[in-house]
Image: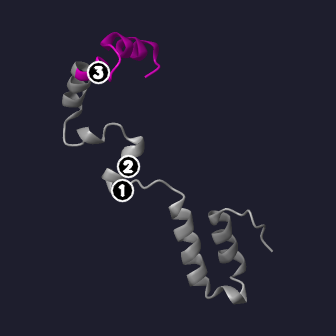
Amino acid sequence: MAALTASPIESATRIVSEGAPAHAGTSAQVLGKAIANACDQIAPLWPLKNFVAVNPFLGFSDQTFESTCATMRRVAGVDMLMPRSFYRDALACGVM
């Protein structure tokens, strides 16, 4: 018998490998419920509008990277790229 603290993924894996208990319904039903439960634990990545909680650049998705860099430099005073010398030195040292 599986522990009561099994994760949804562990539960789904157990169901697939051992089969569902007779009282639980068909394996497909139980697996479907386990997958749905697992999906509820993961932040949505698509559509992109749902990813805003961890994507601070969502409002820039219709702009080029160059345009976004210019906006961030103007509005927030930050650069999204390191200075050219950083990349030149990294290439010279074989880091990149």
Within 10 Å of the Cα at label 3, are there few (<14), some (14-19), or many (20+) other Cα atoms? few
What residue is shown at x 75% (from left), y 67% (from top)? 4
What element does badge 1 sit on?
Answer: loop
Q: Which residue is mark 3?
A: 76
Q: Which secondary structure lies at badge 3?
A: helix
Residue at image coords 68%, 65%: 10
Which image quadrant is residue 72 in? top left
Compare residues 89 and 27 and report the one nearer the observer.
27
Q: Residue furthest right?
A: 1
Q: Earlier in the sequence, mark 2 or mark 3?
A: 2
- Does label 1 or label 2 sit earlier along the sequence? 1
Around disc 1, counting alpha carbons within 10 Å, would you say few (fewer than 14), some (14 to 19), or many (20 or more)?
few
Q: Residue at x 63, y 65 (%)?
A: 8
Quadrant that contains the C terminus: top left
Query: What residue is disc 2 on?
Result: 51
Q: Is residue 42 left or right of residue 78?
A: right
| Three-letter amino acid code at the position of disc 3 | Ala
Q: Is residue 64 part of the magenta span, yes or no?
A: no
On screen, 94 above or below 43? above
Say few, some or many: other residues with alpha carbon within 10 Å of mark 2 (under 14 / 14 to 19 / 20 or more). Answer: some
Q: Mark 2 falls on what kind of element?
A: helix
Position of the N terminus by quadrant? bottom right
Q: Magenta residues, as a range?
A: 75-96
Q: Is there a contact, CB below 8 Å, between mark 1 and mark 2?
A: yes
Where residue 43 sits in the image (x, y, percent)?
47, 53
Residue 41 position in % (x across, y down): 54, 58
Q: Amino acid at mark 2?
A: Phe
Residue beneath disc 1? 46
Does residue 61 appear to the left or right of 41 in the view shown? left
Q: What label does residue 26 carry, if any?
A: none
Q: CA distance from mark 1 to mark 3?
A: 28 Å
Instruction: Give the label, 1 or 3, closer to the camera.
Output: 3
